[in-house]
Amino acid sequence: MTALQNFDDASRRVSYRFLINEGPQYRMGNLLFAGLSDKEAKRLKEKWKLASGQVFNALYLDEFFKEVVLSGKVKIDSGGRTLEFKLRPDPQSLTVDVLLQLN
């Protein structure tokens, strides 16, 4: 980000312009599972709304966790283990695979 400022001494004002370069836009790749039963993985996949090819939104992970996992919409037999999200960005294809893993 670059900030440009313009001082107007006569009116005693300053105006700012900001130039922002967001970089490349990533898209959702694959949703992967590890350490979950086939039944749990299937139910989680059914609830996942970020389709492959859509613009990737990292904030969706928190939303999904709150709305699906914490709410109990999908029961997971964790056996005391922790469900984690791991992101696997691929800078060449500009995609992000998401791994849901019980550790």
Image: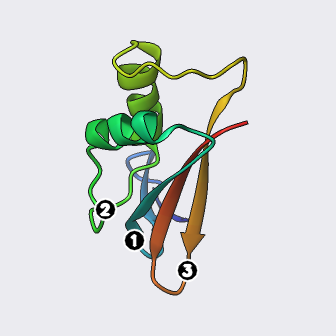
> Relative to the observer, which residue lies in front, 58 or 85?
85
**How many circles with numbers are drawn on the protein?**
3
Report if residue 21 is visible in the image: no
Residue 56, horizontal then vertical, whole percent: 38, 58
Which quarter of the figure is the C terminus placed in? Answer: top right
Quadrant position of residue 18: bottom left
Question: Which amino acid lies under the numbered mark 3 shown in the image of this protein?
Answer: Pro
- Residue for badge 3: 91
Q: What's the CA distance linking mark 3 and mark 2?
A: 14 Å
**Is residue 39 toward the left or the right of residue 86 in the image?**
left
Instruction: Specify few, some or many for label 3: CA neighbours under 10 Å numbering under 14, 14-19, or 20 or more.
Output: few
Instruction: Name the one closer to the observer, 44 or 64.
Output: 44
Residue of label 1: 25
Amino acid type, residue under disc 1 in the picture: Gln
Q: Nearer the viewer, residue 20 or 71?
A: 71
Residue 80, above or below 10 = above
Helix, strand or loop status at disc 3: loop
Q: Position of residue 58 (x, y in %)?
A: 46, 48
**Is disc 2 placed on a helix, strand or loop?**
loop
Spot the residue most to the top.
71
Q: How is the image coloured?
A: rainbow
Residue named by callout 2: 55
Does the CB distance between marks 3 and 1 fall below 8 Å?
Answer: no
Q: Does residue 31 appear anywhere in the picture?
A: yes
Does label 3 or label 1 sit earlier along the sequence? 1
Mark closer to the observer (3, 1): 3
**Gap between marks 1 and 2 measured at Cα:** 7 Å
Quarter residue 20 falls in: bottom left
**How far from the left and from the top, in percent, is residue 15?**
41, 53
Q: Earlier in the sequence, mark 1 or mark 2?
A: 1
